[in-house]
Amino acid sequence: MEERRVQQERDAEEMKRKDEECDVLRNEKAQLEGMVIEMNGKMTSVGDEGRGVDDDLEIEALKGAMKQLQVEKRQLEEEKQQLEGDKEDLQYEQQQLLNDKKQLQVQNEELIHNRMALKGARESLEKTLEETEKELEEAERKMASLEGKGGGQSVSGAGEQEQGERLTEAERKIANLQKARDLVQDEVEEKERELDQSRREAESLRARLAERR
């Protein structure tokens, strides 16, 4: 980026120098044209017979100088047009770099936001997962306790039905907790994938900016 700025300053200085050269040449041309007009006036007043060899030589020299000045002027105008085109190209590239820089800043902000959101979500999900694991362990202990009671005792029909209902409720709770735990884990993995995608997009844009520099 620094090299680009220095090059732009050099191009601006070169364009300024060319403009000054054009101004000098225009002034010189105007002076020579004035001299030619003056010489033409002298020739008209004196007549062809009164004009000397020195006047003819001076006129020819002035004509040659004017032609040379016109050639130099055209060259300078062409160089100036080329510099104008280069300037427009540089301005376009500069605008593209500025747009890419803004886009990268936006993506960086989004990445930071996603990281913070992921961190908060992950902490919340891990807490939920930890609580779910505890509830699951507690449900498994209760289920094991109920199964232990059922294995060593003889109970009435009503007692068996009540115990069976309690076992079924515990199994249902365990299944629900396992399902909730799996959903939480899936959400954690999805957040991690989104963060990875944001990182890849930011790295791709940084690479494009580096190539243009």
Image: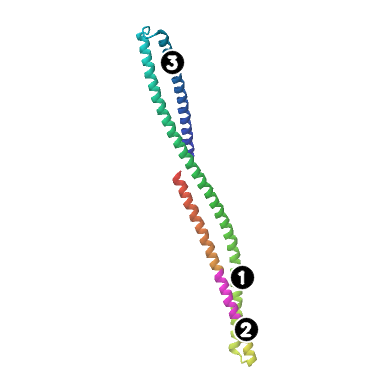
Closer to the N terminus: mark 2 or mark 3?
3
- Which amino acid type corresponds to the residue marked 2 in the rendered image? Arg
Q: Are marks 3 and 1 in contact (CB under 8 Å)?
A: no
Which residue is identified by label 3?
37
Q: Is residue 160 above or below residue 201?
A: below
Report, in whole angstroms, how far the alpha carbon at label 2 lies from the one at label 3.
Answer: 121 Å
Which residue is identified by label 1?
131
Would residue 3 be visible to someone looking at this image? no
Would you identify the image quadrant in which residue 81 lies?
top left
Magenta stretch encompasses residue 170: yes
Q: Is residue 31 left or right of residue 148?
A: left
Callout in the foreground (2, 3): 3
Local secondary structure at mark 2: helix
Which residue is identified by label 2?
166
Would residue 94 be visible to someone looking at this image? yes
Report, in whole angstroms, how far the alpha carbon at label 1 lies from the one at label 2.
Answer: 22 Å
Closer to the N terminus: mark 1 or mark 2?
1
- Which amino acid type corresponds to the residue marked 1 in the rendered image? Glu
Q: Is residue 196 above or below residue 84?
A: below
Query: What residue range appears in magenta?
Result: 169-183
Closer to the N terminus: mark 3 or mark 1?
3
Report, in whole angstroms, how far the alpha carbon at label 3 lies from the one at label 1.
Answer: 103 Å
The residue sitting at 47% across, 36% down in the picture is: 87
Q: Residues within 10 Å of mark 1 (few under 14, many from 20)?
A: some
The residue sitting at 43% across, 15% down in the picture is: 37
Q: Is residue 57 left or right of residue 196?
A: left
Q: Is residue 46 above or below residue 91?
A: above
Q: Where residue 156 sits: x, y (%)?
A: 64, 93
The residue sitting at 56% across, 54% down in the picture is: 110
Callout in the foreground (3, 1): 3
For the image, the number of numbered tags is: 3
Magenta stretch encompasses residue 126: no
